[in-house]
Image (cartoon, rainbow, N blue to C red):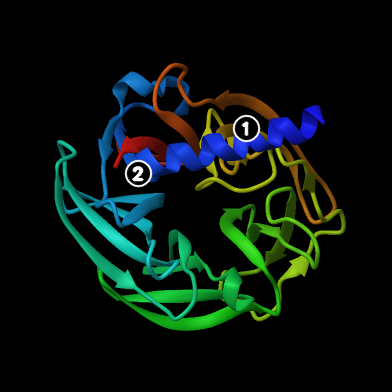
Amino acid sequence: MPNILTRFWRRLNKEVNSFFFLDQWVILTAHTEGHNSISWENFHPLIPPADRYWADPFVLARDDFYFIFIEEKIYQTGLGRIACLKLDREGNLLSNQVVLERPYHLSYPFIFEYQNEMYMLPETGQNRTLELYRCTRFPDQWEFAKNLMTDIYAVDATLLEHEGKWWLFANVKEEGGSSLDKLHLFWAESPLAEKWTPHPHNPIVNDIRTARPAGHIFVQNGNLIRPSQDSSRRYGYALNFNQINKLSETEYEETRLSTFLPPRGKNVLAVHTWNAADDLTVIDAVIRRRK
């Protein structure tokens, strides 16, 4: 009986809150010098209209501007698409435009350069593909290049070039399973390769607290740092920064260095993506707003 009552009150509380409040993913920016110095007091929000949310920010610095590629999900359609926010160097929002849309859900617009061309590897798990797009005009025109994989439900795919190989990290959702807790690793000779070899120890991380990718893997003091999500309390609750200790065709090992939590006593409920370019750090967060 106590468990039934607890679930009842939680459901009732959620329904009451949803009547008065909107829990919405938003983008936040800060001028910082890396993940060790991030603090909630430094971040400034970019708030979308009430009919959508903005999440999964990836940022590029170019031509005296910042370009933040995001998932923009329209509540009415239930589908995400990729949009680009253009900011000046002071962090002021100058424009917002949709740059990639499909009849299925898109999110996590992983941006990278290869052989002097720009590519995007958005999440297309709903289509059971890993789709690569080439930029034909920056920032708003992207053409389909190829499928890196098919017949796979992979989320938040993150590429890393390291020691002559390309490594692809992604959470893989198997039948009856979750997309939150199993990190898989694949490798190839180039990001345009026809074949990606699965790591023999897949899933290399099997933990809802640290598995799912949360942004570009970056180098700090000679070490590879992998941002990841902690979804143990709710989806995308917090950010981890994990040091990759071993990465090869036969080994993988990482250590969690730190966790960035939602601030106490404020209407911030979750945070689950981290990226940076030059001195600008971008994250996303669920904030509770009055309707």
* C-alpha span from label 2 to label 1: 28 Å
| In this picture, residue 206 sits left or right of residue 121 | right
Q: Which mark is residue 184?
A: none
Q: Is residue 280 visible?
A: no
Which quarter of the figure is the C terminus placed in?
top left
Residue 190 x, y percent position in the rendering: 59, 70
Vertical placement of 161 versus 15: above or below? below
**Helix, strand or loop at disc 1?**
helix
Tell me which numbered mark, 2 or 1, is placed earlier along the sequence.
Answer: 1
Which residue has dot 2 on it? Answer: 26
Residue 174 x, y percent position in the rendering: 78, 65
Q: Which mark is residue 9?
A: 1
Task: State the residue in front, 241 or 209.
Answer: 209
Vertical placement of 153 versus 41: above or below? below
- Tell me the amino acid under the disc marked 2: Val
Identify the residue shown where x is 58% and y is 80%. 147
Residue 207 x, y percent position in the rendering: 77, 41
- Tell me the amino acid under the disc marked 1: Trp
Identify the residue shown where x is 60% and y is 24%. 258
| In this picture, residue 245 sits left or right of residue 10 | right
Question: Residue 225 appears in which quarter of the rendering?
Answer: top right
